[in-house]
Image: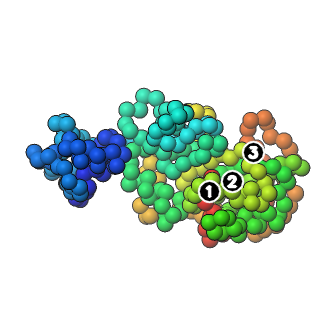
């Protein structure tokens, strides 16, 4: 195995964050091949070096991968001093120290990937790999074609112009609109901020897909491990061997959207043969949640 910093090895074995593991070293609680390590950096080979913490051998944790259907008012954080509900609290019976891959803000719901695989997490959240994330939003007001085009092209925010987005109107009503949005880079609450800039407050925002993963019939608040074929495809995306397919290109041809009201508490599904309106290919998706 390659030489690694000891705090990375300890974090992967479940001893806390890398910063917390650095503190273990500073406190003299870590030994490597019989010698106390007190000064950073400490480089080790996990395959050959004997690493102890408080006199006990360090054994790498088994890598685990889960999907959670995150409810509203749940926080994607490892620790919350106010005692609020965290996403990891839903994964009862999982002994490994897991963490979310990216974040959904507390007001948003939907698909959240959790794992203890730090290398995979870094790749899946890095803009270079452009892993697509699909959201469905219900917004205030009747979004017109001009606002949809501006979202597809990017709008100016405080930190600069947002990246172009894949956006499709699913339902358009007199007082609200349901749209589907694909992004490939995640920034802090950007979908909400972009829509607010266009004059449309977000009522609901749900992530329905992440890369090749989908919520399908997973109930709110429930979780499940990734299936072998899902994990294999996700690892291929993260390795860059197989880039995620881009959505099919469509020309922008406005047409009347359905005005049928979906069942209470449920997102509307597209009818068979119904084409989404207002979809345009873009070179890159806008980021945000």
Question: Label 3 neighbourhood size at 10 Å, few (<14), some (14-19), many (20+)?
Answer: some
**Whether label 1 touches label 3, CB < 8 Å:** no
> Which residue corresponds to mark 1?
288
Q: Is residue 62 left or right of residue 149?
A: left
Q: Position of residue 40 (x, y in %)?
A: 23, 55
Q: Nearer the viewer, residue 134 or 78?
A: 78
Q: Position of residue 13 (x, y in %)?
A: 30, 42
Comes first in the chain, label 2 or label 3: 2
Looking at the image, the residue that sits furthest to the left is 34
Q: Position of residue 90 (x, y in %)?
A: 51, 32
Comes first in the chain, label 1 or label 2: 2
Real-space Cα separation, disc 1 to disc 2, in angstroms: 7 Å
Real-space Cα separation, disc 1 to disc 3, in angstroms: 16 Å
Q: Nearer the viewer, residue 76 or 172?
A: 76
| Whether residue 248 can be seen here | no
Q: Which mark is residue 192?
A: 2
Real-space Cα separation, disc 2 to disc 3, in angstroms: 10 Å
Q: Residue at x 39, y 51 (%)?
A: 118
Q: Secondary structure at mark 1?
A: loop
Q: Position of residue 226 (x, y in %)?
A: 47, 42
Q: Nearer the viewer, residue 236 or 36?
A: 36
């Amino acid at each position: 195995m390659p030489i690694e910093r000891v705090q990375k090895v300890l974090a992967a074995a479940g001893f806390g964050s890398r910063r917390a593991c650095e503190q273990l070293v500073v406190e003299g609680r870590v030994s490597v091949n019989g010698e106390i390590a007190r000064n950073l950096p400490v480089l080790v080979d996990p395959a050959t070096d004997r690493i102890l913490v408080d006199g006990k051998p360090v054994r790498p944790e088994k890598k685990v991968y889960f999907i959670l259907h995150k409810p509203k008012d749940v926080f994607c954080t490892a620790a919350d001093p106010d005692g609020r509900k965290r996403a990891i609290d839903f994964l009862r019976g999982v002994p490994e120290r897991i963490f979310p891959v990216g974040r959904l803000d507390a007001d948003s719901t939907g698909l959240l990937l959790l794992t203890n695989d730090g290398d995979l997490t870094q790749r899946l959240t890095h803009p270079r790999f452009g892993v697509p994330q699909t959201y469905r939003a219900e917004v205030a007001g009747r979004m017109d074609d001009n606002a949809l085009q501006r979202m597809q092209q990017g709008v100016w925010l405080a930190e600069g112009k947002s990246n172009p987005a894949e956006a499709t109107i699913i339902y358009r009503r007199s007082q609200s609109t349901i749209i589907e949005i694909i992004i490939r880079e995640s920034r802090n609450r950007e979908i909400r901020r972009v829509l607010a800039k266009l004059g449309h407050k977000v009522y609901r925002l749900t992530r329905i897909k992440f890369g090749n993963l989908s919520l399908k019939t997973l109930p709110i608040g429930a979780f499940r491990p990734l299936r072998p074929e899902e994990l294999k495809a996700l690892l291929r995306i993260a390795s860059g061997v197989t880039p995620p397919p881009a959505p099919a290109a469509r020309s922008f041809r406005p047409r009347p959207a359905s005005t049928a009201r979906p069942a209470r508490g449920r997102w509307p599904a597209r009818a068979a043969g119904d084409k989404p309106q207002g979809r345009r290919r873009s070179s890159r998706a806008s980021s945000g949640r």
